[in-house]
């Protein structure tokens, strides 16, 4: 299984490399678990910084060539560089042809935008659910701490100060605990 994560943020600030790969090794003897499990991370902001003045070097890097496609629609210089690369690389020539075809066909472009919006909606929903879960967990932790403090005889004012709960909630907790 090979997993490739292409992210539009800096995920690994400890390295300047835009492409990192990982394998699973046994802790003590450091032997590889399997040669069919890899995790690759590609960080686009780092790639874009690297790309800055190194278009020729990226043209030699197969991964770099494919990543250039992601910004080709917005950057004429990149499109021109890809056209030069495509003259020497039949696979890239085919990919660039398909990319241009998709870019010019209004129905294909609309389908792409629809898929993109669906993915963005899904990411937004997951983020909202995570936030709600975190808030609910934080709230439960506040109540558990407040209950423990009240059980130890702490005053409502002290419980409010240390947990951040409003007076009415602390009073309700105290009534339900007694």
Image (cartoon, rainbow, N blue to C red):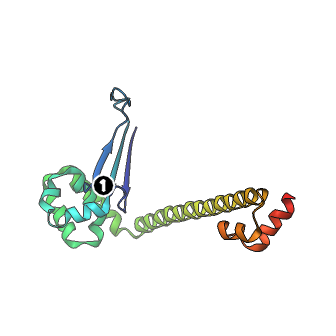
In this rendering, position of residue 169 left or right of residue 8:
right
The answer to which quarter of the image holds residue 56 is: bottom left
Q: x%, y% of residue 121?
A: 54, 65
The quadrant of the rendering that contains the N terminus is top left
Nearest the camera: 63 or 175? 175
The kind of secondary structure element at disc 1 is: loop
Nearest the camera: 176 or 112? 176
Q: Residues within 10 Å of mark 1 (few under 14, many from 20)?
A: few
In this rendering, position of residue 110 left or right of residue 141:
left
At x 29%, y 72%, the residue is: 74
The quadrant of the rendering that contains the C terminus is bottom right
Q: x%, y% of residue 78?
A: 21, 67
Nearest the camera: 84 or 9? 9
At x 32%, y 54%, the residue is: 42
Residue at image mark 1: 14
Seen in the picture, residue 60 relative to 121 is either above or below; the reply is above
The answer to which quarter of the image holds residue 158 is: bottom right
The answer to which quarter of the image holds residue 159 is: bottom right
Q: x%, y% of residue 36?
A: 36, 33
At x 73%, y 73%, the residue is: 166
Q: x%, y% of residue 98?
A: 30, 58
In this rendering, position of residue 68 left or right of residue 174:
left
Seen in the picture, residue 60 relative to 138 is either above or below; the reply is above
Nearest the camera: 151 or 63? 151
At x 48%, y 62%, the residue is: 115
């Amino acid at each position: 299984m090979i997993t490739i994560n292409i992210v539009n943020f800096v995920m690994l600030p400890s390295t300047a490399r835009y492409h990192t790969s990982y394998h699973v090794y046994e802790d003590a003897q450091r032997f590889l678990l399997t040669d069919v499990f890899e995790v690759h991370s590609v960080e686009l902001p780092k790639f874009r910084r690297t790309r800055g003045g190194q278009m020729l070097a990226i043209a030699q890097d197969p991964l770099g060539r494919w990543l250039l496609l992601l910004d080709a629609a917005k950057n004429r210089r990149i499109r021109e560089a890809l056209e030069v690369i495509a003259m020497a690389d039949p696979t890239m020539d085919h990919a660039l042809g398909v990319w241009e075809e998709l870019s010019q066909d209004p129905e294909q472009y609309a389908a792409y935008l629809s898929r993109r919006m669906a993915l963005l909606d899904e990411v937004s929903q997951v983020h909202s659910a995570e936030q709600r879960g975190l808030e609910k967990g934080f709230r439960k932790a506040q109540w558990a701490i407040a209950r423990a403090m009240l059980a130890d005889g702490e005053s409502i004012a002290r419980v409010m100060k240390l947990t951040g709960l409003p007076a009415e909630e602390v009073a309700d907790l105290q009534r339900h605990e007694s």
